[in-house]
Image (tube, grey):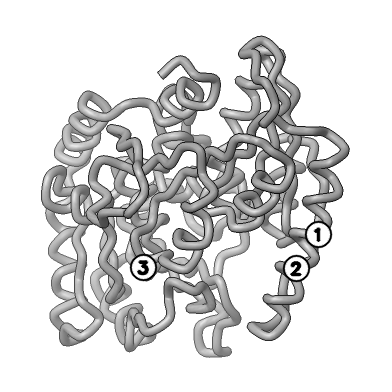
Amino acid sequence: MNEITQDDLTIAITIQHPAHVHFFKHIISELNLMGHDVHVFVRESDVNISLLDFYDIPYIKLANEPRSSVDLFKTQLTYEYNLLKEARKISPDIFIAEAGVAAAHISALVGAEYQLFINNEHATLENHLSMPFASDIYVPSCFYSNPRFSVTRYNSYYPLAYTHPDWFQPSPAVFDHIPIDREEPFAILRLVSWNAAHDVGQNGIKDVKYLISKLEESGIRVLISSEGALPSSLKSYQMSIPPHRLHDLLYYADIYVGEGGMTAAESALLGTPSVFINSIDLGYLNELENRYELVTQISPDVNSDTIARTIIKLLTENKESVWSKRRRRILDEKEDMTALALSHIIGND
């Protein structure tokens, strides 16, 4: 393993998902300001590249986005092979990743530390393939799984690396990209693609069109954010905004309803009422619901009318002062995730 001096670290960060860009963007900036040599490696997706370009983060693309489940294995091999070549060029002291299988393997081959951040109990395949190679494993304090490897539990949430007010201030410029006036009530409806490994066997909103109709009857506009292609009957609801404006939109929305757990947490941490409709069970959402009352989780098996009534009830009871108070409690009790991650990465924890 390379001898590490805290004044001169060569750090490799791998990014596979847009959430990784958000998680690491301020960490990368701060590490650069400290004088460390940071290298970012990415697997292509339109959103990943768009975000990295917008935040002016230099990167090396190692593989294209897989186009099918069959293509996934080939893409992973290409990604790991190219990552090994790049790692040998820079001799990193530390690899850092969020559920990064490639970083796990390559860090071991080049003798680097591997610092692994895990947020999702259900990403079992990625976690099992990554954990054995990790020098340090970081999970939130609400992580309910008991890994067989030693972990450090942190008092924060993954999205607080970029939704914390020290790092995020909402911009009303997002309204330039949507057909809604700032004073008009609207909901964000998030649909996932169900292609992720941890989504296998799970399910979400059963009757999207019916749910939209009930929301519209209550006087609220609906904008859809979808990972996959939408049927023609829903295309008129699909929003098109620059990816870096998503969190502005979540902040200004009157409510978030969706199948995406991370987006549900982001909305809650921005003070927006959040309804999560998915069969998956996530520790961070359980805590956001049971301790902070910022998330409402509903089983997809619940009757569609009951789901609609629950959402509309939340809308009618939505008082900004209540949600702001709940958000303030989180900020008082939880740590800034960017500052916390930096303290672990550079060894000052």
Residue type at the position of mark 2 = Leu
Residue type at the position of mark 1 = Tyr
Q: CA distance from mark 1 to mark 3?
A: 36 Å
Q: Position of residue 10 (x, y in %)?
A: 73, 26
Q: How many numbered callouts?
A: 3
Residue tagged 2: 77
Residue type at the position of mark 3 = Gly
| Earlier residue among tags 1 and 3 | 1
Q: Secondary structure at mark 3?
A: strand
Q: Quadrant of the N terminus?
A: top right
Horizontal arrangement in the rendering, residue 90 relative to residue 308 (left or right): right
Q: Within 10 Å of the Cα at label 2, are there few (<14), some (14-19), or many (20+) other Cα atoms? A: few
| Of the pair 255 and 106, the residue shown nearer to us | 106
Q: CA distance from mark 2 to mark 3?
A: 33 Å
Residue tagged 3: 258
Q: Quadrant of the C terminus?
A: top left
| Earlier residue among tags 2 and 3 | 2
On screen, residue 55 above or below 146: above
State yes or no: discs 2 and 1 in contact (Cβ < 8 Å): yes
Q: Within 10 Å of the Cα at label 3, are there few (<14), some (14-19), or many (20+) other Cα atoms? A: many
Q: Within 10 Å of the Cα at label 1, are there few (<14), some (14-19), or many (20+) other Cα atoms? A: some
Residue tagged 1: 81
